[in-house]
Image (cartoon, rainbow, N blue to C red):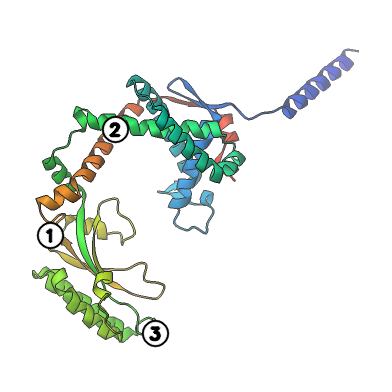
Amino acid sequence: MKMKRWIAFALCAVLAFSLTACKFSTPATVMTVDGVEIPAGVYLTYQYQAYSSAQSRREDSKVAVLKTSIDGVKASDWIHTETVEDIKQYLWVERAFDAAGLSFTQEELDTAEQWIDIIWSYSGARMEENGIGRQSYRQVYLNDEKYTKLLEAYREGPDGQVTEGDAKQYMQDTYSRIRRLILPATDADSAALTPEKQAELDALAGQLVERLNAGEKLDEIAEEALKQAYGICGREYTEDALSSDMGAFFISEETTGFEEDFVPTVMAAAVGDAGVYQNNAAGEGVSQPVVYQKIDNYEDNLDFTENYYEALQSEITSDAFSQQMKAELEAYSVQESGFAVWSYRPSNIK
């Protein structure tokens, strides 16, 4: 009799577990950040953004993102780390916005709702498929708007003032400007050059670099050099060739798309120094030399004031505000629910 009762109890327990399993639902919260519970919808919204960011950063777009690494870190781990950091910032912004006594005008809220409606009309179905409701997306969207208002308030305060001298020094420390001349790399039939013609074109590029390093300026010898290059390639030189093949741009330590040592070499170079690099977008089997010369970041004080000062002020204050926020975020504790994190793992994203 006791054995029958034990078996009956065991069967009831199994049945109860089965019924519970049938009623299983995904966790409502995923983690606690600095004592505040984070709803699953907010977590999934930031995870979806991190996933999209990882997709754009992978080296080979043909490989599934979760089978790649981002900055040497397994993609799934990178996505999770980014998600947690974004959620910490989300909480900080919510607190800072309230502490600063900031608010939205009705006009700002109406505009935000209009943008949310537009975005949701395009992406809402996909987000819902990944467990993100409109209200969760709205919370994250408005949080971004709150960050913008906090940044604006910071810029208007004493810490947001940037003198012209400070802006010039920042520009000098952060950016280098180069003028570059892209030499033609194909013949009149748009085919790759023969080895002999390629060697001749490369030799011309080398000669240009020598002349520039001896004191000449690229903008003064570019047309002459480009006509020589077109002649080597057997192509007709046109009047618009110079305007399309020569230009100037800024680089910084964050610049990508060049050979590994290119950026540090340019950053360390003096104004007037020149060199040559290969155009990576020239096409398969095509070797296209690009001659460059480092030039001043701006022409004169008027050029700086009219074209760069305002943008640099914005960049400097944005960086300072971000660093201040990140310093405070370091004190935030994070307690994750292992089961919730597993339930909402990146591999579930559709």
Q: Position of residue 74 (x, y in %)?
A: 47, 46
Dot 2 and dot 1 residues touching (CB under 8 Å):
no
Q: Of discs 2 and 3, which sits in the foreground?
A: 2
Rounded to the nearest angstrom, the CA distance separating label 2 from label 1 is: 36 Å
User: What secondary structure is found at the residue carrying circle 1?
Assistant: loop
The residue sitting at 43% across, 35% down in the picture is 111
Q: Quick check: 152 above or below 247? A: above
Q: Of discs 2 and 1, which sits in the foreground?
A: 2
- Furthest-left residue in view? 215
The quarter of the displayed image where residue 21 is located: top right
Identify the amino acid type marked 2: Glu
User: What secondary structure is found at the residue carrying circle 3?
Assistant: loop
Q: Which residue is mark 3?
A: 189
Q: Quick check: 204 above or below 115? A: below
Q: Position of residue 35 (x, y in %)?
A: 45, 19
Q: Position of residue 96 (x, y in %)?
A: 35, 24
Q: Quadrant of the image for the N terminus?
A: top right
Rounded to the nearest angstrom, the CA distance separating label 3 from label 1 is: 38 Å
Disc number for residue 83: none
Q: Earlier in the sequence, mark 2 or mark 1?
A: 2
Q: Which residue is mark 1?
A: 271
Q: Earlier in the sequence, mark 3 or mark 1?
A: 3
Q: Position of residue 176 (x, y in %)?
A: 20, 55
Is residue 109 found left or right of 223 in the rendered image?
Answer: right
